[in-house]
Image (tube, rainbow, N blue to C red):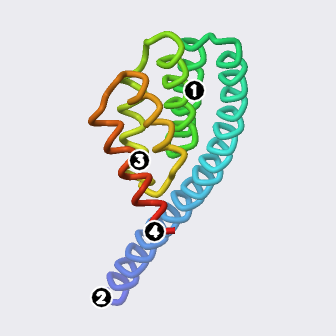
């Protein structure tokens, strides 16, 4: 009688282990499929972001700043890790600022953020300097000129 109870207990334990293994492998398969789907989705979003950026550049070339900025922001939403898109947004605001006196504050905010990340990028500093000069901001102009001098001495 005891032998039968041990066998039933052992069969029960094996059944439970088998059930857990089956659940593990099913979940692992779903996880791997989701990972593959996520990678595909990211690739598609990146491709779409490039297309949206091209449309934004066309709008910017046509001096349709607001629409271009909206398109760049859509591209950034599709590919939020892309600082190149942020640079294009800053340039769009900067161009709008220099030609219409709108978007200056937004341009400076984005340039400040980018320069905090890429402090050795002369182009970013020069672009921000042009906005400071346009606004007549002597403090900002002086700070950017000092940054440029410092960079030229280091190289």
Which residue lies at the image location 31% right of the left edge and 86% below the top edge? 1
User: Marks 3/4: CA distance?
Assistant: 17 Å
Horizontal side of 36 relative to 66 (left or right) equals right
Closer mark to the observer between disc 1 and disc 4 = 4
The residue under label 1 is 72
- Considering only order in the chain, which callout, 2 or 3, is on the residue closer to the N terminus? 2
- Considering only order in the chain, which callout, 1 or 3, is on the residue closer to the N terminus? 1
Give the label on residue 95, or none. none
The residue under label 4 is 154
Which residue lies at the image location 35% right of the left edge and 32% below the top edge? 109
- Considering only order in the chain, which callout, 4 or 2, is on the residue closer to the N terminus? 2
- Considering only order in the chain, which callout, 4 or 1, is on the residue closer to the N terminus? 1
Tell me where residue 122 appears, x and y as whole percent.
51, 50
The residue under label 3 is 115
SS assignment at label 1 = helix
Picture quadrant of residue 123: top right
Tell me where residue 103 appears, x and y as whole percent.
42, 17
Nearer the observer, 83 or 12: 83
SS assignment at label 2 = helix
Horizontal side of 145 relative to 32 (left or right) equals left
Q: Are marks 3 and 2 in contact (CB under 8 Å)?
A: no
Using the image, determine if residue 93 lies above or below residue 102.
below
Horizontal side of 132 relative to 48 (left or right) equals left
User: Marks 3/1: CA distance?
Assistant: 19 Å
Which residue lies at the image location 36% right of the left edge and 40% below the top edge? 112
Closer mark to the observer between disc 1 and disc 2 = 1
SS assignment at label 4 = helix
Picture quadrant of residue 46: top right
- Considering only order in the chain, which callout, 2 or 1, is on the residue closer to the N terminus? 2
Closer mark to the observer between disc 3 and disc 4 = 4
Nearer the observer, 145 or 42: 145
The residue under label 2 is 2
């Amino acid at each position: 009688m005891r032998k039968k109870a041990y066998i039933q207990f052992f069969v029960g334990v094996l059944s439970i282990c088998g059930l857990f293994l089956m659940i593990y492998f099913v979940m692992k398969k779903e996880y791997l499929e989701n990972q593959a789907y996520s990678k595909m989705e990211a690739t598609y979003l990146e491709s779409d972001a490039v297309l949206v950026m091209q449309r934004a550049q066309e709008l910017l070339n046509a001096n349709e700043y607001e629409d271009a900025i909206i398109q760049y922001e859509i591209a950034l939403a599709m590919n939020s890790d892309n600082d190149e898109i942020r640079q294009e947004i800053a340039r769009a605001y900067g161009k709008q600022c220099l030609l219409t006196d709108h978007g200056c504050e937004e341009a400076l905010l984005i340039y400040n953020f980018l320069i905090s990340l890429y402090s050795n990028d002369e182009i970013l500093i020069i672009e921000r300097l042009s906005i400071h000069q346009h606004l007549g901001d002597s403090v900002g102009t002086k700070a950017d000129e000092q940054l440029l001098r410092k960079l030229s001495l280091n190289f």
